[in-house]
Image (cartoon, helix red, strand yellow):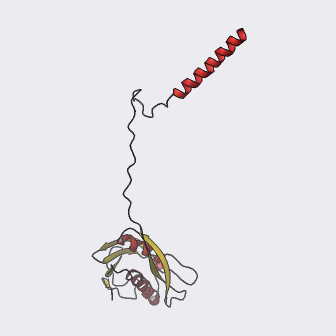
Amino acid sequence: MKILKARGLLAVIILSAAIVGCGVQDKPQNPGSEIGETAPTASPTPAPTATINEREAIIYLTDAELVETVENPVKLSYETDLDLVKAALAELQKDAGENALALWKPIEIKSVELADGQVTIDIHLPDEARLGAPGELLVIETLKKTLFQFEFIQAIELLNDGEKVETLMGHVELEHPMNRE
């Protein structure tokens, strides 16, 4: 009889522990909140999604001998026209293999602005980016060909350390601004 009572008592203890365990709730995360008070849950509000556009473009680089421009087709992702210009300039600074060199690679682009169809690009030209006359012509030509393919760009203003300069590297006279032909 004692064994039967012990088993019954053990079953009741296990059963009550299981029932109590199922009814336990997690403690609230917020210290100081009262028992029975539920913290309001903030429902996530969807962030306004910007439309990401993708466009095929041609980035103009140069051949290894600095004789002619080389076309490098790329896909650019952008939200605004300014983003498109910045993406094109970033691609202009990337090499595309052995036969296509980016003359813009060592040039530091400090800022890019777009207003009323004119792109204003402020650059810093380190010594290693300075080239002879043919190289300087190609630097300007690759910039113009790359950016003027976008119909919303009518002019390019190129500044060196925030100032309009007569020549970029000492050989070719710069127009201020360079207009679409």
Q: Quadrant of the C terminus?
A: bottom left
Asked if one can make out residue 106 in the rendered structure from this viewpoint, the answer is no
Q: Quadrant of residue 16?
A: top right
Q: How many marks on residues?
A: 0
Task: Give the image location of residue 166, x and y in percent.
Answer: 33, 84
In the image as oriented, which residue stretches furthest toward the top? 1
- Left/right placement of residue 2 relative to residue 134 reads right
Task: Give the image location of residue 143, x and y in percent.
Answer: 41, 82
Q: Quadrant of residue 42?
A: top left
In the image as oriented, which residue stretches furthest toward the left? 116
Asked if one can make out residue 14 in the rendered structure from this viewpoint, the answer is yes
Q: Could you say which is closer to the camera, residue 94 or residue 32?
A: 32
Residue at horizontal 39%, vertical 53%?
46
Task: Give the image location of residue 85, x and y in percent.
Answer: 39, 74
Task: Give the image location of residue 164, x and y in percent.
Answer: 31, 79
Q: Quadrant of residue 139?
A: bottom left
Residue at horizontal 41%, vertical 84%?
145
Residue at horizontal 49%, vertical 30%?
25
- Vertical placement of residue 7 versus 151, above or below: above
- Left/right placement of residue 170 relative to residue 118 reads right
Q: Could you say which is closer to the camera, residue 14 or residue 99?
A: 14
Q: Quadrant of the N terminus?
A: top right
Residue at horizontal 45%, vertical 32%?
28
